[in-house]
Amino acid sequence: MASKIHFQIIESASTFLDPRRDFAPVTESFQVRFDPLTGRTGHFSHFGAIKPQPLDMDKYTDPQIKGFCPFCREQKNRATPKFTPEVLPEGRLARGEALLVPNLFPYDIYSAVLSEHEGLGA
């Protein structure tokens, strides 16, 4: 007799300091799902938290228009999240033109975004 397929799901969470909540600690849940046939995993997060935004395509023809950039020098300290002190005491990691911050929509316990941006600075 054939054995039954067993589906495994691990529920987990990631915590970071959220700029949208005055850098209060926020915990986001995610799942790791295992494919019983291939042994591969898939990570699922933010379960519908991202809503499509309408774009005004006419603005993209104007070279003077610059969209919101959370990683730009004037925005990065107030618009990007921070790691909790247990993970990285200084909150963010900046080296040269690179900035590492936690992902606002994590898909693993330690989920980060690296931005390389000219003039980013520390």
Image (spheres, grey):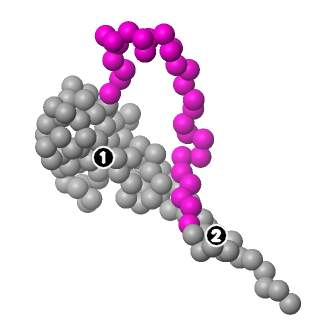
Residue pointed to by mark 2: 35
Answer whether residue 44 is magenta in the image.
Answer: yes
- Residue drawn 25% across and 40% down? 116
113 is higher (above) or lower (below) than 65: below
Mark 2 Cα within 10 Å, few/some/many (few <14, many 20+)? some
Label 2 element class: loop
5 is higher (above) or lower (below) than 41: below
**Location of residue 101 in the rendering, given as x and y in whole percent from the top left corner:** 29, 46
**Quadrant location of residue 6?**
bottom right
Q: Amino acid at mark 2?
A: Asp
- Residue drawn 27% across and 59% down? 87
Q: Which residues are magenta?
A: 41-69
- For residue 24, say whether it is visible: no
**Location of residue 13 in the rendering, given as x and y in whole percent from the top left corner:** 47, 58
- Residue drawn 38% across and 9% down? 62
Would you say 110 lies left or right of 13 here? left
**Quadrant location of residue 108?**
bottom left
58 is higher (above) or lower (below) than 73: above
**Quadrant location of residue 68?**
top left
**Label number found at residue 14:** none
Would you say 75 lies left or right of 50 here? left
**Label number found at residue 114:** 1
- Count of numbered marks: 2
104 is higher (above) or lower (below) than 70: below
Would you say 2 lies left or right of 76 here? right
Answer whether residue 71 is magenta in the image.
Answer: no
